[in-house]
Image (cartoon, rainbow, N blue to C red):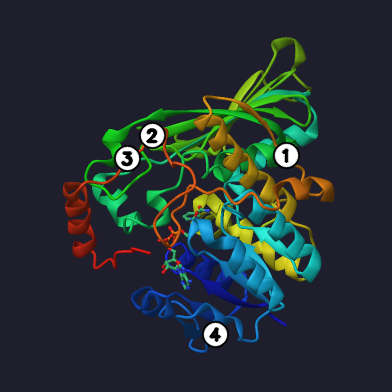
């Protein structure tokens, strides 16, 4: 019997519809409070799919699982509600937006016994997948240094299309928070995780001109001591020039990295005195796709260099009890905690923070009430700044942003 899935949040969620269909999941219901998005998505679903604008009503449907692609900082309460309603959860990044939510989410998974998987897709692009296999093969030796970049600048119009109001999450997300696409691949490739984090950010208030954004840093950079004794540096999503994502692991015998500007290819180099038999000193190549149920072109076209394909396949097999996902609830909240604590490091001028182990019940007690958040509450106040230098959109900024929202019929989000 096909897994019955419901999908919430139908912007990025459109790709989940595509991948769910590809893997033969039964899309029972879709939900978005924006009627226009709901109507658009309905046309891509089977005729039997039911449509909802209310999440609680949607959850009453008979489904095995729910995919959460709603606002970045609202995943935890949605995930807990779904699991308490007896559904498994596939959750977009980030899993939790406060340390208290990290505790709540872990305990909800343990209490309900439901499956929880983060839909982190960048580790499963062709390049990082090959790096993972190569590192596991052992020819490179022990990793000592790894690096990950995720850079996503946009035109003024694109920024305004995606930042859909002064109180939309994209207006307030600190530069360390969107990090799963940079640290996630490194964790997956090396199977190590950050033990401490130290972070800095670079202000670029000029990027806010003509937008509704409060986040005025252009980039944040994090530095971690890893569980395997290596060190690691990576960015959060950055708005600096030159779009792309790039990963490197440097080991005792050589390095492997993705090729800049070509996420599918890797460059592998051994020390001349440590070249394994049958290998070259330096080689750049496109790895083969292995283990897919579909042709390579279908895998790649599924989105994000094939990453979206593998995420849905893993989730399906997880729900069927055939596999365990790499990004389970513990690794998912670990990444959220790095983001949150890295941001405190930035605000404190680069202090070093220990990353909590949420498997440890005593550790949970230290964070159970830690609700500090840079995202605005209902009264539009925040606990901590979302940028090193605070920026408040001016009337001229908002006027410029509204031109784009009007042009594309975007409903401004003000709560
Ligand atoms: N992994 C990736 O490659 C990738 C790419 C883009 C976005 N994302 C993630 O996907 C998520 C969504 O991103 P987006 O760009 O689509 O954001 P978005 O804000 O444009 O869309 C979120 C959608 O959720 C809907 N929504 C919010 N609250 C709701 C509620 N209570 N009930 C019903 N619908 C509700 C909104 O109306 C909106 O249509 C984020 O967590 C983001 O980080 C991941």
Is there a contact, CB below 8 Å, between mark 1 and mark 3?
no
Residue, disc 4: 57
Q: Quadrant of the N terminus?
A: bottom right
Whether residue 257 is visible to the viewer of this picture, yes or no, is: no
**152 to the left or right of 55:** left
Local SS, label 1: helix
The CA span between labels 2 and 4 is 40 Å
Residue 53 x %, y %: 45, 80
Residue 71 x %, y %: 48, 61
As drawn, 293 above or below 206: below
Local SS, label 4: helix
Residue, disc 1: 133
Residue, disc 3: 391
Residue, disc 2: 218
As drawn, 250 above or below 2: above
The CA span between labels 4 and 1 is 43 Å
Q: Residues within 10 Å of mark 4 (few under 14, many from 20)?
A: few
Residue located farthest toward the top when viewing the structure as drawn? 273
Label count reads 4
Residue nearest the observer in this picture, 292 or 380 = 380
As drawn, 300 above or below 281: below
Q: Quadrant of the C terminus?
A: bottom left
**Residue at x-position 62% and y-position 70%:** 23
Residue depth check, mark 1 versus mark 3: number of the one nearer the observer = 3
Displayed quadrant of residue 311: bottom right
């Amino acid at each position: 019997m096909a897994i019955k899935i419901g999908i919430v949040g139908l912007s990025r969620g459109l790709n989940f519809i595509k991948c769910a269909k590809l893997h033969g999941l039964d899309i029972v219901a879709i939900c978005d409070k924006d009627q226009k998005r709901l109507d658009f998505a309905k046309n891509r679903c089977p005729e039997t799919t039911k449509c909802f604008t209310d999440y609680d009503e949607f959850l009453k449907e008979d489904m095995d699982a729910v995919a959460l692609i709603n606002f970045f900082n609202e995943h935890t309460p949605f995930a807990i509600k779904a699991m308490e309603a007896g559904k498994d959860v596939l959750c977009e990044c980030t899993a939790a937006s406060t340390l208290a939510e990290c505790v709540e989410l872990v305990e909800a998974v343990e209490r309900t016994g439901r499956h929880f998987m983060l839909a982190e897709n960048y580790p499963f692009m062709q390049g990082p997948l090959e790096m993972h296999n190569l590192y596991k093969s052992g020819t490179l030796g022990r990793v000592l240094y790894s690096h990950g970049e995720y850079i996503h600048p946009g035109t003024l119009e694109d920024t305004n299309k995606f930042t859909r109001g002064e109180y939309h999450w994209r207006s307030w997300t600190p530069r360390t928070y969107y990090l799963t696409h940079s640290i996630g691949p490194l964790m997956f490739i090396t199977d190590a995780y950050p033990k401490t984090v130290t972070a800095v950010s670079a202000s670029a208030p000029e990027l806010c001109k003509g937008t509704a954004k409060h986040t005025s840093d252009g980039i944040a950079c994090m530095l971690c001591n890893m569980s395997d004794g290596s060190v690691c540096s990576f960015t959060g999503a950055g708005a600096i020039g030159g779009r792309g994502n790039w990963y490197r692991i440097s080991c005792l015998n050589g390095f492997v990295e993705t090729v800049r500007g070509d996420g599918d290819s890797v460059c592998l180099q051994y020390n001349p005195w440590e070249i394994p038999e049958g290998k070259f000193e330096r080689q750049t190549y496109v790895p083969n796709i292995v283990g897919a149920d579909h042709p390579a072109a279908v895998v790649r076209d599924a989105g994000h260099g094939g990453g979206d394909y593998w995420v849905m396949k893993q989730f399906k097999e997880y729900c069927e009890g055939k596999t365990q996902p790499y990004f389970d609830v513990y690794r998912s909240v670990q990444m959220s905690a790095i983001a949150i604590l890295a941001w405190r490091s930035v605000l404190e001028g680069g202090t070093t923070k220990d990353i909590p182990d949420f498997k440890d019940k005593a550790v949970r007690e230290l964070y159970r009430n830690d609700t500090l958040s840079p995202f605005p509450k209902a009264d539009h106040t925040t606990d901590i700044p979302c940028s090193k230098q605070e920026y408040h959109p001016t009337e001229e900024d908002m006027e410029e942003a509204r031109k784009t929202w009007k042009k594309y019929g975007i409903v401004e989000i003000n709560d």
